[in-house]
Structures are given as C-alpha cells and as structure tokens.
Amino acid sequence: MGRTPYQQNHMNCIVMNLIKFVACLIVAASLTAQAEDKKLDLSGTWKSSFTNQTGQVRETIFTFKQEGEKFTGTTTGRNREQALEEVKVNGDEISFQVTREFNGNKVVTKYTGKVSGDTITGKTEFSRSGETRSREWTAKRDTTTKEKSEKSD
C-alpha cells in the first residue's frame, strides 16, 4: 500500500529535521572540544618590570604552576621569593595576591589581569600610608625558559 502525498511530505520533514538535529549535535560537540583544547596554560616563567617613583626599573619574575584546575606559583624580585596567594583563573582572566614585608609592615599587592597568548596585562592595587594605589602591569612569558624545560623533559 502506497503513501499519500501528505504522508510522504510529512515523512520527508521528519527526516530533514532529524538530519538538522544531528548536524547541530556534531557542531556543538566540535565547539566544546575546541574550547577544551584552548584552556589557559599559565605554566612557566613570566617577566614583568616597572619604573618606581625614584626612576629605578624593578623586574619581577612570576612562576606559575598548574595541576589540573589548580594554579600556584611564586614571585621573585629584589632578591626575595614570595608565594602567590589566592590564585584564581576564570577563562582568560587571572587574579592573585602577594604579601611582602617591608620594615616590619605587611604589604598586600593584589594583581588582576587578562591573558592573551604570552602576555598578561592588568592592574595592581596596594595600600601605602593608608592610601590605596594602583598601577598598570604587564608580564611576558619567558619562552626561553619554557623551551629549556621542555627539552629537559
């Protein structure tokens, strides 16, 4: 027994909708896989420098480590190494803080930034003499250090 034109047209619509649905699933799965491939990799050494109020250029080195979703690290500058505290990463944004001691006083510097390739740009905030101050900061990934560690693995 044959199908009526209405039944045939209805069946064609169902098949076309099913094909569209499967195609959407494939595209969604592909986009999810690409997003997972582009997870932020901060691991390695990053260098930052700024000129202080007396005209001296200060270099700071940040070393980030990543274990799964957890980020840790240290900062080195002025012959001191300090742990990075409260490291948080959300998409391409990073925040952390560093507590340093100067003349018996603890100074907390809060860093926020956005990662783009091998560059982090953002802002630091700290208090001095009861006044909150901020400055722009930029850090560049030290690719020579990363290459050396990959060769030694």
Image (cartoon, rainbow, N blue to C red):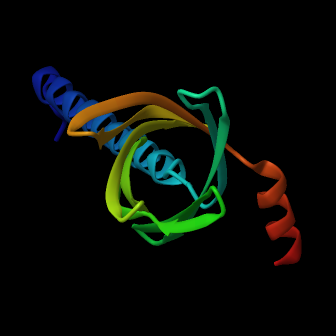
* Left or right: where 89 falls relative to 119: left
Q: Quadrant of residue 22?
A: top left
In front here: 121 or 10? 121
* Left or right: where 60 falls relative to 96: right
Residue 90 in sight = no
In front here: 134 or 91? 134
Q: What is the residue that sits farthest to the front in this orientation? A: 103
Q: Residue at x 66, y 33 (%)?
A: 56
Name above or below for residue 71 compared with residue 111.
below
Q: Residue at x 53, y 27 (%)?
A: 53
Image quadrant where one finds the C terminus? bottom right
In front here: 62 or 44? 62
In front here: 21 or 73? 73
* Left or right: where 107 falls relative to 55: left
Q: Residue at x 36, y 55 (%)?
A: 97
Q: What is the residue that sits farthest to the bottom in this orientation? A: 153
Q: Residue at x 37, y 54 (%)?
A: 96
* Left or right: where 45 falls relative to 126: right
Tell me residue 51's x, y (percent). Answer: 61, 29
Q: Quadrant of residue 50?
A: top right
Tell me residue 23's x, y (percent). Answer: 38, 38
Tell me residue 57's x, y (percent). Answer: 68, 34
